[in-house]
Image (cartoon, rainbow, N blue to C red):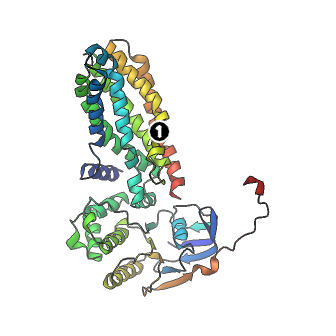
């Protein structure tokens, strides 16, 4: 299992691996927002948590079609399926690799981009916590979507359409944690909901993804 | 361990293509599948490898015994030849990874290419790497789908020797191929197992 994770990370960091794609996208979205909505700092501060969350979510979405499609194209997914590893472990490692290469850099850079959007001082901690708690759900849900569309040529469009509604609960509660944190309100309720969504996705979706993958590999 | 297939029917695109296929592969023997294009050789191999369910019939003795080599080699272009092999050895959980990998590299004359990224290999060299992968899995039954595609004559000979060694050390193999490899084993022509077109009695025309 560790070998698969290690290989996926190695592939992502080498030339053409797509590392930094999500990061660059996130950066562009957040940098462009102040140009589009104008420089009023109160307005920017109000929309900052939402913008940061949408940017992170779309950046995650951007790299999803690489999660399983590359292995499908070169035949290694078939070979992995005949290996002693259960498919559940394979999809879990795939989500894990996606989280480390795509979501984790977004979490790390988000406070820096918060500065660009005049995020109020108390909001940084809660922004990072909400992203840390919410992005695993994004990766796992995304891997499920990738498993659903793995056999399709140019399945990216279908993948986005399938995954976006599933992302909505995570976005609502994640952005709510960041917003309440920035406004200095109590964050417990949305934080617990967000944690619940992540835990439930992590517990259930690897099995669903593996089942879907078994059907798609036929 | 003997691989026994009894009365197997396989489907491609929800249509049965082969039915009533029965054979047994004992250790030390190879089964060579013959038959024209489209007869269902790949479908049969994928079913035996466990990648798709059997339509009817049973497969015994295949569980965790099979190393499968498909048309695609499953190589990562940015990893070197050695890294590709090492990854598969680790995935299959063999004990002496380094030893196995260098043995497989030697078997297919890939030592000089060991540190080259797979992207820079020729088609024949990629194929050799794909076949070398079978050796690092440590699995006794090798299932190969047209393994000699894009190999030159000396590589084909080398490949036949490797398979022969594998058979002598108690392994077995199932190979779909159109050329003669000179291996000890039986040939199975799939033409006679072709599923006859069926008349559907309960076809619901209104459904269309």
Q: Quadrant of residue B59?
A: bottom right
Q: Quadrant of residue B93?
A: bottom left
Q: Is residue B61 visible?
A: no
Q: Is residue A36 visible?
A: yes
The percent position of residue A133, horizontal first and vertical second, equals 37, 29
Question: Front-most of B87 and B116?
Answer: B116
The percent position of residue A40, horizontal first and vertical second, equals 26, 15
Chain at numbered mark 1: A
Residue corresponding to mark 1? A163
Callout count: 1
Residue drawn at point x = 36 percent, y = 23 percent? A50
Q: Is residue B205 above or below residue A37?
A: below
The percent position of residue A125, horizontal first and vertical second, equals 28, 21
Question: Front-most of B166 and B151?
Answer: B151
Task: Give the class, few, some or many, for how many residues have Cα within 10 Å of label 1's Cα (few <14, many ≥20).
Answer: some
Residue drawn at point x = 36 percent, y = 16 percent? A180
Q: Is residue A21 above or below residue B202?
A: above
């Amino acid at each position: 299992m560790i070998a698969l994770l290690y290989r996926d990370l190695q592939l992502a960091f080498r030339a053409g691996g797509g590392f930094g794609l999500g990061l660059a996208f996130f950066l562009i979205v957040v940098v462009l927002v102040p140009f589009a909505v104008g420089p009023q700092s109160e307005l920017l501060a109000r929309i900052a948590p939402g913008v940061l969350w949408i940017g992170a979510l779309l950046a995650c979405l951007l790299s999803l079609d690489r999660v399983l499609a590359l292995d499908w194209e070169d035949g290694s997914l078939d070979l992995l399926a005949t290996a002693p590893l259960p498919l559940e472990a394979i999809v879990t490692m795939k989500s894990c690799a996606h989280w480390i290469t795509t979501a984790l850099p977004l979490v790390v850079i988000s406070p820096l981009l918060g500065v660009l959007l005049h995020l109020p001082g108390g909001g940084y901690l809660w922004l990072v916590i909400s992203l840390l708690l919410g992005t695993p759900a994004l990766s796992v849900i995304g891997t499920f979507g990738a498993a659903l569309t793995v056999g399709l040529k140019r399945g990216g469009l279908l993948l986005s359409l399938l995954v976006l509604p599933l992302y909505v609960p995570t976005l609502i509660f994640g952005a709510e944690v960041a917003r309440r944190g920035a406004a200095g309100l109590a964050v417990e309720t949305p934080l617990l909901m967000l944690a619940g969504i992540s835990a439930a996705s992590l517990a259930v979706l690897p099995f669903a993804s593996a089942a879907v993958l078994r059907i798609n590999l036929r | 361990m003997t691989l026994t297939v009894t009365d197997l029917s396989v489907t491609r695109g929800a249509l049965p293509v082969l039915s009533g296929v029965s054979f047994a592969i004992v250790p030390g023997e190879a089964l060579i599948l013959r038959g024209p294009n489209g007869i269902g050789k790949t479908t049969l191999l994928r079913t035996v490898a466990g990648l798709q369910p059997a339509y009817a019939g049973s497969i015994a003795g295949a569980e965790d015994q099979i190393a499968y080599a498909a048309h695609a080699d499953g190589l990562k272009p940015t990893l070197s030849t050695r890294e590709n092999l090492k990854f598969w050895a680790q995935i299959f959980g063999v004990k002496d990874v380094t030893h196995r990998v260098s043995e497989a590299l030697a078997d297919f004359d890939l030592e000089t290419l060991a540190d080259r990224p797979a992207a820079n290999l020729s088609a024949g060299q990629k194929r050799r790497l794909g076949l070398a992968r079978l050796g690092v899995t440590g699995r006794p039954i090798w299932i190969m789908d047209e393994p000699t595609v894009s190999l030159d004559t000396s590589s084909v000979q080398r490949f036949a020797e490797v398979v022969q060694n594998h058979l002598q050390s108690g392994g077995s193999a199932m190979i779909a191929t159109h050329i003669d490899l000179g291996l000890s084993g039986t040939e199975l022509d799939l033409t006679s197992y072709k599923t006859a077109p069926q008349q559907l009695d309960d076809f619901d025309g209104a459904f269309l």
